[in-house]
Amino acid sequence: MFLRFVVLLLALVPLRSTGQDLAGHGGPVRALAVLGDRLASAGFDQAIILWNPATGRAERVIRWHQGSVNALVTLADGRLASASEDARIAIWGEDAAPALVLEGHTEPVVGLASAPGLLASAGWDGTVRLWDLGAGNVRILQGHQGNVNAVAFADGALHSAGQDGTLRRWEADGTPLTRAEFGFPQSALLALPDGSLVSAGVDGTVHLVTADGTTRILHAAPRPVVALAASPDGRMLAVGSIGGSVNLYALPEGQLRHTLDGPGLPVWSAIFARDGLTLWTGGGDRRVRRWDARNARPLGPLATEAEEMPQAGLDRHGAEIWRACQACHSLRPETGPMAGPHLHNIFGRRMGSLPGYAYSERLARGDITWTPETVADLFTRGPDVVTPGTRMPVQRVGNAEDLTALMRFLEQATR
């Protein structure tokens, strides 16, 4: 399957960073969603992170899915829906557990789309499923040959794109109508406010399909396109590829306006803020970056790195490694609430014992005492192995020198 092949391919692609980023995930950032005044991100580390862009901090980390989180979407009622490699869809309120779990797909779910009272899902089991959230029932739509990779509501109807290279419209009786045949697997699909659709393929071509059926090419490049985003007014389109590029096009004319410099290889996800002026991208380098959509300039890190810059005399190498942790943790007890507990005096403290923090059930057992050795083990084997059931994103430090430097830094900075 194409996307599985891409995941293997990405391990061979070198990563680069401009520093204009938010580091919190332990794997590629596969999906983004705007949730009220917050930003949600999710990825291959099985975690969903809710960020407060105003403060630049992670407010909540959700670890529930048993596989990579492939898609996020905001529902009409303001809640968040997530879909995963584990073939399940979860709808989230404010509780730690899902408010609703939708099951039925037999293979990974890789695409979501919402309309009032409805949620559509695209699965690698070859089906599109249309969930009536009010009535609690589901319609199974079959017609694609192979994986279905994306869904979108446009012009009053549900559409889907798949591995068979087709774009299909689903009639009220469940009959699929082929809107377009592109000849190559389609990896992303996006609806525009005017009822048009944008479909992206593994051949690097992006097509615009208007409501009247007219099809034209907006973008052509040698690398597969896996991320599409449109500004709320439909006047700007972001196209992201596994090659690391993000191009911004003016619509409807399709004129290339900007190319983002250094968004991170590859780009798996993109979304515009509600004002249309800010673009967020998520990449294979595990980072979320934000950009000024008017001039394609990076806007700076969401996480306020200046607040956690190491003091003089602290290990500089370890401080660089620490940056992936500071999105969720603080070194000082006086810092406001974050997604994870503060690490002041972490060594010698029993797991799950910090007063006032709502630990996951696994951490609340308190059967590990944090020492440089046990923390190093956590980052060597991964929190999903050492403390299964934790809400902590999967973070591993595979380089021995990096791990040693991080332990030196923590011993110095958490006293």
Image (cartoon, rainbow, N blue to C red):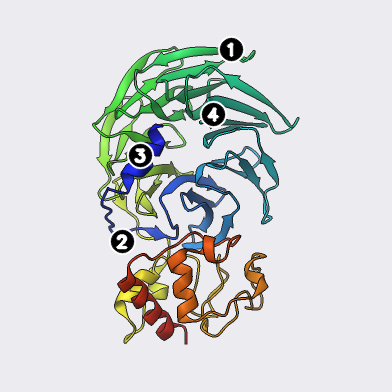
Q: Secondary structure at mark 3?
A: helix
**Residue type pointed to by label 3:** Val
> With respect to residue 14, does 199 lie above or below?
above
Residue with the mark numbered 1: 175
Return the x and y of residue 75 as percentages of the image width and height. 61, 39
User: Mark 2 or mark 3, which is nearer the start of the sequence?
Assistant: 3
Residue with the mark numbered 3: 6
Residue 31 is at least partly visible in this image: yes
User: Mark 2 or mark 1, which is nearer the start of the sequence?
Assistant: 2
Location of residue 139 by image quarter = top right
Q: Which tag is nearer the camera, tag 4 or tag 1?
A: 4
Return the x and y of residue 265 as percentages of the image width and height. 30, 48
Badge 2 local density, few (<14 within 10 Å), some, or many (20+)? few
User: Mark 1 or mark 4, which is nearer the start of the sequence?
Assistant: 4
On residue 125, the disc is 4
User: Which residue is pictured at 60% across the width and 32% down the height?
Assistant: 105
